[in-house]
Image (spheres, coloured by chain):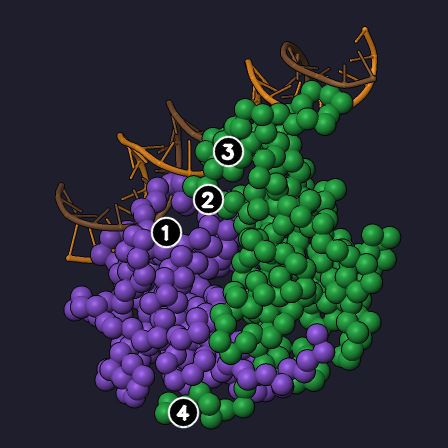
Chain colours: A green, B purple, C orange, D brown
Amino acid sequence: MTTHPADHPRPALAVDVAIVAVIAGALQTLLVRRGEAPFAGHWSLPGGFVRIDETIEAAALRVLRDKADVTRVHVEQLYTFGAVSRDPRMRVVSVGHIALLPPDRFAAIATGGDVAQARVALPASGSAVALSPGGDPLPLAFDHAEILAATVQRLGGKLDWSDVGFALLPPEFTLRQLQDVHEALAGRSLNKPAFRRRMIDRGWLEPTGRREAEASHRPAELYRHRPT
Amino acid sequence: MTTHPADHPRPALAVDVAIVAVIAGALQTLLVRRGEAPFAGHWSLPGGFVRIDETIEAAALRVLRDKADVTRVHVEQLYTFGAVSRDPRMRVVSVGHIALLPPDRFAAIATGGDVAQARVALPASGSAVALSPGGDPLPLAFDHAEILAATVQRLGGKLDWSDVGFALLPPEFTLRQLQDVHEALAGRSLNKPAFRRRMIDRGWLEPTGRREAEASHRPAELYRHRPT
DNA sequence: CGAATAGTGTCTGTTAGACACTATTAA
DNA sequence: TTAATAGTGTCTAACAGACACTATTCG
């Protein structure tokens, strides 16, 4: 082919970021309410257009900073969504990302008005739905239900052989907290002794020697993640 | 944000496709020699720009058809590469894909001149290299060494819980052929009885009742892939 | 003490690797 | 019969699930 890249009409390129945390055993994500067409009044993942001189990852980090005031966060690319009419205004291709936050940092993001935290559910053989704290489904803009569905699947699949779980916890955590995160993402309950054995045998954990404080029962040991 | 997608300067959007097969126990890919700048004389993965009215996957399938005359093929999206200067002409973001072919179909692609088949190797902690049949490293254009490195890693990781292996085999195959593919992608040799047990127990295999023909020894049973 | 949760010992069933063995074809 | 590869029986080690048990804290 002897064509030059500039010769063709081209799609716009965006990033969308599913900012997720596990809270009360459920996957939560951050949604912003759209004020304008298209999909005015619907909810969408935070997103933005990739600038001509920034990488895709930098665009995702910028969105995180600008829309959720979040920095220093685990971000990974998910999938690139390119349906022709996913944005009715014009052709827009979006690179979906996942950002993982510990519960405290997620809860600290200012919400209210146009920003909400929603529980993500993935009904069998359907697309994802976002539920308000009250339990009502929130209408999602664009193909963002699809992006959330891919997010849930990716998180469930990667768990066992990656360190995704730790990015969803504070720097020091108990084994029970780690197990809760894994159970939420795997969508099933796990065996306690087997889970503890596996995590410890993999060498991913470093005991801090400290214990949790605010418990009305036996306090658990605190661990740190030892990066491989 | 109140901006419209058309208001921004935007990158060009391309697809690149690693067309791969396992031949003689090694991962092979198809490369085309670039005739023009940039990287004239270097080798690149087949690629092309995404048209304004086609999906990303359709663009990848079009590239496969136009550049390798391949249709009806297993294609999956790999990763989107967005380094700012990956193309010196202008900003080009590329969605990398993997296309899986059985050995006979891969070998049937016309080569010579500007099209070559190259062995892909991934040295420890380095980027991928493409080796000509003679064993010489082929210089790769753009960031295509990175795309090939991601390809090798993806194929190795997905093997055990997906049906990637079958897309790299003819419709009917022997268990030994299947094991050879798995060994090539995993980069290590596997235990024969354990491999056979696992594959059969998963219910992925359907005996055809036929046996291979051209052997100077005991012929192996032929199986078909039973999609789950 | 009771309540509550942390953490462990141990049994059992499943699975993977090792290895030797038998089976079947062509020449 | 020999060469070559297909395919199996079986032992053992590693690992996961189940379940009951002990340990430690608060009140």
Q: In front: mark 1 or mark 2? A: 1
- Residue beneath disc 4: A3
Whether labels 1 and 4 share one chain: no
Does C2 appear above or below B165? above
Q: Residue at x 40, y 63 (%)?
A: B151
Q: Residue at x 38, y 41 (%)?
A: B193
Q: Three-letter amino acid code at disc 2?
A: Arg
Do the residues under discs 3 and 1 have CB atoms within 8 angstroms?
no
- Residue beneath disc 1: B186
Disc 1 is placed on an element classified as helix
Q: Three-letter amino acid code at disc 4?
A: Thr
Whole-percent x, y for residue C26 in the image: 22, 57
Subunit of label 4: A
- Residue beneath disc 3: A205
Whether labels 4 and 2 share one chain: no
Question: Label 4 to label 2, Cα distance in Å?
Answer: 49 Å
Whole-percent x, y for residue B22 in the image: 33, 62
User: Counting residues from the N terminus, which is met first, the one under dot 1 or under dot 2?
Assistant: 1
Q: Residues within 10 Å of mark 1 (few under 14, many from 20)?
A: some
Q: In front: mark 3 or mark 1? A: 3
Whether labels 1 and 2 share one chain: yes
Question: Label 1 to label 4, Cα distance in Å?
Answer: 38 Å
- Residue beneath disc 2: B198
Q: Residues within 10 Å of mark 3 (few under 14, many from 20)?
A: some
Subunit of label 1: B
Question: Label 3 to label 1, Cα distance in Å?
Answer: 27 Å
